[in-house]
Image (cartoon, rainbow, N blue to C red):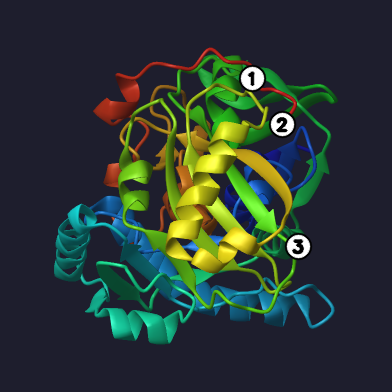
Amino acid sequence: MTDDVVVVGAGIVGAACARALARRGLAVTVLDRGGAASGTTAHGEGNLLVSDKEPGPELVLAQHAARRWPTLVEELADELGPRFPAVEYDPKGGLVAATTAEGAQPLRDFAARQRGAGVDAREIDVARALELEPALNPGLTAAVWYPEDAQVQPVAAAEALLASARRAGARVRTGVEVTGALRHGDRVVGVRTSAGDVPAGAVVLAAGPWSGVVAARLGVALPVRPRRGMVLVTTRMPHAVRHKVYDGDYVGATQSGDAALQTSSVVESTAAGTVLIGSSREQVGFDDRLRAVVLREMAARAVRLFPFLADASVMRTYLGFRPYVPDHLPIVGPDPRTPGLWVATGHEGAGIGLGPVSGELLADLFTGAEPEVDPAPFRVDRPAVLAAGSPSEEPGEAS
């Protein structure tokens, strides 16, 4: 039997593609060389943000996602029932703070631009910020409250999307590595794998930061590179951090194309009572070694936001790789250079939030339905993608 679609990648973006395609009646198989949701999805914080995006196509997609997530959570709960783990959707809002005099005005200016694009970005005074976060540094110089920000448990969300896809008939095969393309003339008609050939009417590449390497195996250049990030996790404590809180430098770090190390402070509590502390960004290929200097810098920044963290104990640290694209926009849609190949990748640190709507956008394009957002900015053949070439790194064990 030949599937209609093979999806390469069982993280949250691949899971979303599989669900959206299978629910439209297509025969779908998902392949992943590791376990489901074991790569980038398992190493993220579950952020669903509008607060970190400049006005433009990615913000439009994020606003669409912010509207879509509450109904998606209800759909998954109805489909899967109370025995399936909750995705822990929490519309808790986000607070962005500046702790220096020079950081205050850029934060206010950024929020003003976002308000012009329809974001609920509320500039608040220090007293209001301390009402929202009593443990916050009272010496902050500016603050903006974003009630539209939310969070989910990323692995639970990906597993729920895969379970929904299975209910619609999709198959999920883990421990299967894609090694090449099956072709009929110029058209991709499936993939070669470590477990044998898998024919299909089309292939969707959704392998996160490994998409560039897998694309090369399929005979296509795709400029998706890994961008490493690290996270500190404290021991459990009473909930002293009520929302997602980060400093104003975070936006600049997410939008930078600099390969060198960049850090900013991102702090939030989990349902389990731990506190997650990020974030870092650096382009070092698939090097999965933790660096103490990065962790120290992240910790120091976090203490500037929340002084009480100076006495907190760190339980563990971990790192992951984000799929970086030079123009900081996801790649979603058909690859016109290679009939039969479709792409859904390049979300960098926004894949959890944007994954479900990216899957639905791809399914709309695949089936000829009218998309709810303009797909043109995310097309495969945009100049920034075609001009950037393809990465040369082979995926490491961290994938």
Which mark is nearer the camera, 2 or 1? 2
- Position of 313 compared to 229: left or right? right
The image shows residue 397 at horizontal and vertical percentages of 75, 26
Residue at (56% x, 33% y) in the render: 293
Asked if one can make out residue 360 in the rendered structure from this viewpoint, the answer is no
Q: In the rendered view, would you say 244 is above or below 366?
A: below
Asked if one can make out residue 352 in the rendered structure from this viewpoint, the answer is yes
- Name the foreground residue: 250 vs 153: 250
Q: In the rendered view, would you say 396 is above or below 369?
A: above
Q: Contact (CB < 8 A) between labels 1 and 3?
A: no
Q: Earlier in the sequence, mark 2 or mark 1?
A: 1
Residue at (32% x, 36% y) in the render: 256
Residue at (28% x, 44% y) in the render: 377
- Name the foreground residue: 325 vs 279: 279
- Name the foreground residue: 41 vs 221: 41
Residue at (59% x, 18% y) in the render: 184
Q: Residues within 10 Å of mark 3 (few under 14, many from 20)?
A: many
Residue linked to disc 2:
398
The numbered dot on residue 181 is: 1
The image shows residue 62 at horizontal and vertical percentages of 37, 61
- The kind of residue tagged 1 is Ala
Q: Residues within 10 Å of mark 2 (few under 14, many from 20)?
A: some
- The kind of residue tagged 3 is Ala
The numbered dot on residue 163 is: 3
Q: How far apart are labels 3 and 2 at the CA level?
A: 24 Å
Residue 1 occupies which quadrant of the picture?
top right
